[in-house]
Image (cartoon, coloured by chain):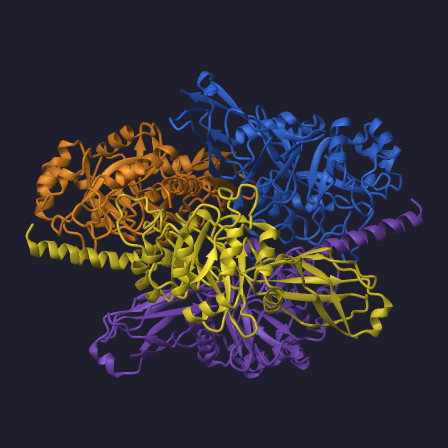
Chain colours: A blue, B orange, C yellow, D purple
Amino acid sequence: MNKNKLKTIAALLLLFSFVLTAFTQSRKEISIPDIKGFKTLKCDFHMHTVFSDGAVWPDIRIDEAWLEGLDAIAITDHLEYQPKDDVKGDHNRSYDLAVSKAKQSGVLLVKGTEITKSMPPGHFNALFITDANPLNLADHRKSLRIAREQGAFVMWNHPGWKSQAPDSAIWYDEHEYLHNEGLFQGMEVYNYDESYGPKVYGWAKDKNLAIMASSDIHRLVSHKYDLNKSHRPMTLIFSKDRSLEGIKEALFARRTAAYFNDTIVGQKNHLQSILNQSLRYKAKAELRKDKTIVLQIFNHSDIDYELTLEEKSKDFNIPHHIILYAHKTSLIQITGLSDRINNIEKIYLPYTVRNLIVAGGDNMLAKIEVLIIH
Amino acid sequence: MNKNKLKTIAALLLLFSFVLTAFTQSRKEISIPDIKGFKTLKCDFHMHTVFSDGAVWPDIRIDEAWLEGLDAIAITDHLEYQPKDDVKGDHNRSYDLAVSKAKQSGVLLVKGTEITKSMPPGHFNALFITDANPLNLADHRKSLRIAREQGAFVMWNHPGWKSQAPDSAIWYDEHEYLHNEGLFQGMEVYNYDESYGPKVYGWAKDKNLAIMASSDIHRLVSHKYDLNKSHRPMTLIFSKDRSLEGIKEALFARRTAAYFNDTIVGQKNHLQSILNQSLRYKAKAELRKDKTIVLQIFNHSDIDYELTLEEKSKDFNIPHHIILYAHKTSLIQITGLSDRINNIEKIYLPYTVRNLIVAGGDNMLAKIEVLIIH
Amino acid sequence: MNKNKLKTIAALLLLFSFVLTAFTQSRKEISIPDIKGFKTLKCDFHMHTVFSDGAVWPDIRIDEAWLEGLDAIAITDHLEYQPKDDVKGDHNRSYDLAVSKAKQSGVLLVKGTEITKSMPPGHFNALFITDANPLNLADHRKSLRIAREQGAFVMWNHPGWKSQAPDSAIWYDEHEYLHNEGLFQGMEVYNYDESYGPKVYGWAKDKNLAIMASSDIHRLVSHKYDLNKSHRPMTLIFSKDRSLEGIKEALFARRTAAYFNDTIVGQKNHLQSILNQSLRYKAKAELRKDKTIVLQIFNHSDIDYELTLEEKSKDFNIPHHIILYAHKTSLIQITGLSDRINNIEKIYLPYTVRNLIVAGGDNMLAKIEVLIIH
Amino acid sequence: MNKNKLKTIAALLLLFSFVLTAFTQSRKEISIPDIKGFKTLKCDFHMHTVFSDGAVWPDIRIDEAWLEGLDAIAITDHLEYQPKDDVKGDHNRSYDLAVSKAKQSGVLLVKGTEITKSMPPGHFNALFITDANPLNLADHRKSLRIAREQGAFVMWNHPGWKSQAPDSAIWYDEHEYLHNEGLFQGMEVYNYDESYGPKVYGWAKDKNLAIMASSDIHRLVSHKYDLNKSHRPMTLIFSKDRSLEGIKEALFARRTAAYFNDTIVGQKNHLQSILNQSLRYKAKAELRKDKTIVLQIFNHSDIDYELTLEEKSKDFNIPHHIILYAHKTSLIQITGLSDRINNIEKIYLPYTVRNLIVAGGDNMLAKIEVLIIH
């Protein structure tokens, strides 16, 4: 084959490749509302490609993120573990191969890497690094110090991973040391398909760590999570704007929450604000002749809020268990209102929200306020 | 059985019945945005119950409407046709039996009836009547005059119904007469599962008639329409507020559109406003080095907008056919931008929207405006 | 209007009505397999219409049944309770109005009625009666004796209904009397959306009663159950053929099971047979070099079988919890096989099936047999 | 880090990787029935990985195939085009890296490669090769001869691909030559998302070529096709058994069909057999007093068969257009039967099936036979 012919073929294949890489499906937008003063960004800062033990080319991670409605991701290939004999490339390579598609699609790409050690201290992701290669050191303290010099935000990955913490997560002296030295600022409370429970949620509060959740996906997101009914685990970032700088500032300020399996773990004020912004209902409801109030609540978020009655009222009856389905309006009947209600202006429905969990505390109290029209 | 026992049973059954009638599913909200200055109410003004040739108790029509996300309905049983030997009740009875459930659930119930004559003039619904019984007359002119005296809004039903108009809809002299007398003000362009086409759409404009669509449901809405993928036909009302008075004012003012099968037929300004309010996109887009602009459009309405290119531009390439899927973000690439683009601030994408049809005109032109960041 | 004109209108409306009543959707077939020697018929023998406290015309119950894939239903309007002032008709009327649509659509219609008394003894459905009117008596014993004379099969409805059994179901002396007299032969273990638990399941065995489940639907089935994801409660009948006679014989022979919420309560042999017929898997599986056996199981039923490990084996590892999803193939890895396996021909996987419950016993043991290819 | 520590990490990561690669979702089985004497295998013989211009590691193609219900695939990386600087590996490498997962999951993996030339003759896949490397030659005739020596089956890919055939597919002299030499035996009539139309279908018949359809997927199947509603394009193989040998024999015997977009293109006898095996209906139907026959047809395949009336009968009326929905039962009313019907035993419903297309012919005629019970 002469050179010209070869050129033609290459050109044709490029064209082919271009057509094939165009998005042929649409992006689902994730409906978790912004909170007061901040945008709620949906982020996944932990995933792999063929440049470590993952199974996809880096730009596939951008396609997945765009289609699933994410705002930002980090590709965090292992520094210490590049098992593929056929793939060569330094530790910045997966970022370099994905950044152009990221810009094209509007997905923000955080430069990151995974520092992969046995426990303690386990695995750490360094985010917002400038160069991954110098971090590839046997001594994790040195690695983390270089990350800090690069201005990185560092998260402790899967503290309760069964392979490294068979009984449950342990806060080793080494973690105390690293934490005191300011060498990590965040922590996964959920990874892949596992939650690490109240003990780890509590550390987020006690140690002032950003609460995070990640897919840690190695193969395909769509093969792990049923994207028609569910979603990958992700970190919610309450950011001043939709930008890399905004995300970095929010991470260091600990304005984050973990979102997985229709559940959010976070700080009380963040959860309260998300719930308030998710629901639209007429605060004013008419007291009917049959001593009944009918309340309609529209939940425009993606989350099915599951409410359980905290304590019964002597003055009225309400259902013990309610699900406020995502993108639907629910109708709640308040019946058997006592005569005492005739003299008051508002009542509170004392529900706890089973799938909104305060890190270092209990489930969130919804306290739905109803003004009564007499 | 003594009387006390009977009372106990009746009480228990009432309780039973009460529990059973509570809504156990949630309401889907229909996402068709409000337009400038008006709320977009979703209404169906044509349906039947056991009090004519329908197959459900009147309050079932309220349950259906609430669950499907409607704002208002009218039950319009035939005056002339009550075929059920076992059911007795005057022509107001279906309204009376449904109005309490309507108030409880917040669905607005318009009092209506159907005047059912052979063609010409065919069938007419009188809406916002005060008493249906006096309208039950052999002479439709007399019927319609009484309706007018009651302040009713009158619509001509299914002008192109095959049984009465086997070839196609005909504007008879009698329609001219009734119209000139002000005895009807609106007209269905779609009924049940049939559209009457451009000729009838044109009458809406030429005769200044409110454009309407109805289910004319006799049995169950859920058995006729696949409510997971589609919706019943309905009339969109652009109303000052969500009230019966608002709807009546809007009907007489002809601020209506017909919504069926993911398609809207209406006035140009209404359609334009719905489209504008449905889409969110960054009007400003960056001109990239590769002479490409990438545009992301989020369609938060229920309607999959189908766009077809009106004419090719000499200055850039855009896809010939685009579907902006409901509740999704689509990505459009504008490629091959000519150098002329370097000197201009904005471009227009000349798409027509195949499922937005101007009554008495063509498909709507979308004219998506893009400001270019150089 | 002259007589001829009236006739024309009536004729047109009849035509209209005919067209409208045609099925516009398709029937879902329920995939619960036949068992050895018997067809598995899907039946609901408890529901209401406008002829008692229901809200639909009788033939709507046929439409619903056909679309949902049922083989047979009984309309069982209350004898004692016809609350609708506007509806007149004797106690056979709802049957008479539905039987023609039943024949047309192939749904088998069992003639039935509900004898509605306070507790004890509560409510009873008499099925396969010849005339409902003579059963309308204050004395339930007399009623039930007449039912018996008509050859009826009688079921005790919702024994644990909160309104009649606020704490839990009670087997009163009156039930002992009626049962000894042969005045009822079956019993609901599930009604509407409530299961009556192991105590009542046990009665089915101890008293030799046919196990049944019913919708007891008063309003619309599609408004109560999400028919895209779930199904109404129903009685499975293991019948010699698909006929009314077959169903009657099977009921008296107690070849029934209760199917609700993806769960079946029944006799052990019936459950075992359903499970066996639901699953297709290669009984023979290869022992791989890595001491692993990979098993693929295709579940072609509608039921997601939920398996939980009964006891760990010393000779291999299998997952603790498996869901064999409906209409899907699941892959199960048996790992860590001990050397002892080299000498044996087959192993059993000791799972219990959480949603197959033996009446009067525990959950069913699946005992999946695997022949090993060495 | 000392050596032992490194080993521990590697071991842990291997464990991690093992867990992550287990299937966490279930396999959908594709319901296209077997035909008389042959199993209907679902195959895709055209796809790419990182070892040419694809974006996934080879074993991902096995995961996708298993989850989607395929029986067999071939990975066909371009010989001439390996654009990834970071990936090295010879032309057998993608097969070698996928074959173990294939065996584990039961997906049959055909060894293949793509010979990629400009038009004429365009691109060819060689299937069932033994070694891809010797085929990498500038001269395609030599390549194809080596393939033939290896016993390969060769298919012509996307003859109508716009980049190589801008107007439409052309049968060049070179194709005539190659075909006469026995250097290719099959041809895609559909590739990715494009069908090449009747002209190309005709070649299948005229030139005795196996009819094929392929995804030619470069990125993710789930990002290109909406797998909840649709499926990737594939070749149906009518094979003596489910084995690689069976597939090879069937390919050379031209027992294949192309399945894409709910449509099958194939030989008439194959299509007829698929349709017959897809439908279950009582062939005998009762002639009712109202001169009506009601027919129920259960379609247990995945395909929505779209029937259009070929010609009206003088003796009865049937719907002009019917869709026999997948996995549903449809009810067809035959009305207005003439008296002539009283004397005959069976009638034929003369429908054509719009989505079953005979290669080199027209749409398939369904000819549904109905025996009449008088």
Looking at the image, is D43 positioned above or below residue A369?
Answer: below
Whether residue C26 can be seen here = no
Which sits in the foreground, D29 or C55?
Answer: C55
In the rendered image, residue A138, in percent from the top left (x then y), is placed at: 89, 42
* Left or right: residue B222 compared with residue B185: right
Position of residue D149 relative to residue B83, above or below, is: below
Task: Looking at the picture, tell me which residue is in the foreground, A163 or B76.
Answer: B76
User: As rendered, which of B216 and A80 lies closer to the eye?
Assistant: B216
The image quadrant that residue D252 belongs to is bottom right
Q: Residue at x 52, y 60 (%)?
A: C180
Q: Quadrant of the N terminus of chain A?
A: bottom right
Q: Specify the quadrant of the image occupied by residue B124.
A: top left
Residue drawn 85% across and 49% down? D9
Q: Residue furthest left?
A: C2
**Quick check: D261 above or below A304?**
below
Q: Position of residue C301 (x, y in %)?
A: 56, 63
For the C terminus of chain A, the image quarter is top left
Residue D286 in which image quadrant: bottom left
Q: From the top left corner, tell me how far across and down residue C332 is, in percent.
A: 70, 62
Q: Give the percent coordinates (x, y) of residue A334.
A: 47, 30
Count of marks overlaid on the render: 0
Drawn side of residue B79 relative to residue A366, left or right: left
Pick out the residue farthest to the top: A343
Q: Is residue B214 visible?
A: yes
